[in-house]
Amino acid sequence: MDTTTGVITSSGDLAFSRPRENSLALRLAGDWTIGKVIPSPEEVQKQVDSGQPLQRITFDTNELGSWDSVLITFLLKVFDQCSKRQIDVDRSGLPEGVRRLLDLAAAVPEKKDARKMALREPFLVQVGKAGMDIARQVTGMTTFLGEATIAFGRFLVGKAKFRRTDLWLTLQQCGADALPIVSLISFLVGLILAFVGAVQLALFGAQIYIANLVGIAMAREMGAIMTAIIMAGRTGAAFAAQIGTMQVNEEVDALTTMGISPMEFLVLPRMLALILMMPLLCLYSDLVGILGGFVVGTGMFDISFTQYMGQTKASLNLTQFGIGVFKSAIYGVVVAITGCLRGMECGRSASAVGDAATSAVVTSIVLIIVLDGIFAVVTNIIGI
Amino acid sequence: MNNKEPHITVHDLTMAYGDFVLMRDLNFSVNRGDIFIVMGGSGCGKSTLMRIMVGLKSPAKGQVYYGDVSFWETSPEQQEQIIQNVGILYQSGALWSSMTLAENIALPLEQYTDLSPSQIGEIVSLKLSLVGLAGFEEFYPSEISGGMKKRAGLARAMALDPDILFFDEPSAGLDPISARLLDDLIKELSESLGATIVVVTHELASIFAIGNNSVFLDVDSRTMIASGDPKELVANPPDPKVHRFLTRGEDKEAAK
């Protein structure tokens, strides 16, 4: 009995014949390469399942053209089916290269426990793990804050070891270099505040109070908040990335094993720089914001220069500025500490540096907003 | 070798990351003046062992003795004193990238000595010329090649004339000639300074060229399976795995 059925495709051809009752010959022809249409191993399965039970499969590859991994995977699937049905495979008909690749693929058996199992943990375990994770983060942050405080104390008594040039460089980076962006953002914030307020105040003919609105909002809140957020995105992320890269390059290890405290050498100058520069930037931002309000007030709502200035002066006192400046110093600490903390926690790969920078920005902005809420409540209670 | 006194002793050491035990029951001594090799396959914990020995990571169990002092049980002041006597060459050189080579080498000197800036400058030039980098004082780490970074890292490790030098994979990423030159330099330093040297590596050529004592960490059994002079280990391997490692697996059948 010699029944021949064929599957004709554009390139990889597969034909079957039964030279004997219990054996099947696979004739492979054409090109079996990636991108060409290849017969499915299921065709073989159909042949195997139809007719008499098989004991043996042979191959004929005299007309086989070029081949690559596609052929190997096809054969591996066929072999797998055969071994399940306890059919012998005679590989002698296959090209030498194919046989060697098949041997190589089977040389080292699959390591069963190597594959990661997608274990779904019970809900309570997940909750517990998340809780422990939060506890660990809080501990890490508190420890870091404590170490930073000790380093600051050592600086105050003149014992801290760091390079003065590092401090000057950081002062410049997070002070003078930040002026353009702080100018732009503060000016626009003043402008927007004036616009939003003026439309409402004009209903009552009280446009002149734009000056109060912009002055108080900038001095108490917006100056501090906007500089803090700019610095979180600009400087906090940079701190995390700088220190994170130093972790990856083992530079932090090198400091530690030289007996130089990374806390004093890396974190302290950055912290000092931000504590010193933030209040200055905040004051600057207040003034630029007021200028923004002034442009809207005088340019669009017919308030005269002297009127606007007089109204602004009358509405503001040192306390308003003091609150903003004090808050900005605190936000400076927050931005510096979170930036450095995320950098020090950084893992030892390039992608970890990116994660550290992102996480530094997110954490500091969240902390800044939360702290600002607390400040608002506290100042309200003590009545300033 | 046995008449020498032990300089660093690792006793009953277990190292772990969280619950995952990397190596257990490590016991060996590094004698004064040895070039001691820590070898083993990739990922077996050689570098972690070094981090524990130099005080960067605490062991899960066991001790590291420097002389008679147990590093992980002594006071922070004494730890600092021990660590001052240890120089480390990290895998990537780990030069501080914001500083010039001269500043990199000068930093430990400024930290621990009262030398004047001009004296420090002289020492910096000397150390750089010892590693063949004379004249590169004002270069930044990003401006020099990988091999030069390693040598500059070595100059920094030697800044305080330490008694003990650690090398983490000194020949990794170097071309054969640079690697060979670094090996020669290590040997030269050992002979001229009399320093104790610990080298973490899996480079066979280096192991045989410089090592006179060693420990072999095995990733499967998670402990050390051999110790001694590498040349003797290859002649009389105590374990087929050691033989296979030291002969680059050429004798596959013997290992099975």
Image (cartoon, rainbow, N blue to C red):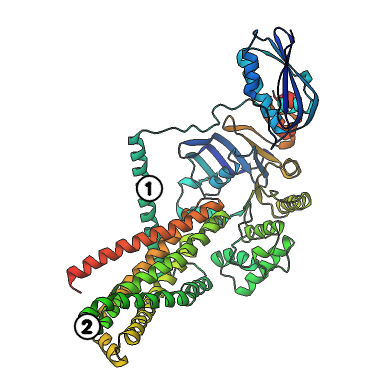
Outermost right residue? A62
Using the rendered image of the protein, determine whether residue B118 is visible from the camera's viewpoint: yes
Q: Amino acid at mark 2?
A: Ala
Indicate the position of residue B134 as horizontal and vertical percent values. 73, 66
Image side of residue A98 versus residue A314, left or right: right
Mark 1 sits on what residue? A136
Q: Secondary structure at mark 1?
A: helix
Indicate the position of residue B97 as horizontal and vertical percent values. 60, 63
Front residue of this view, candidates B3 and A58: A58
Mark 2 sits on what residue? A206
Using the rendered image of the protein, determine whether residue A218 is visible from the camera's viewpoint: no
Q: Residue at x 61, y 55 (%)?
A: B87
Crowd rating for badge 1 (residues with CA inside 10 Å; few <14, some 14–19, many 20+): few
Label total for image: 2
Indicate the position of residue A52 as horizontal and vertical percent values. 65, 7
Q: Quadrant of residue A271?
A: bottom left
For residue A50, which numbered disc appears in the image?
none
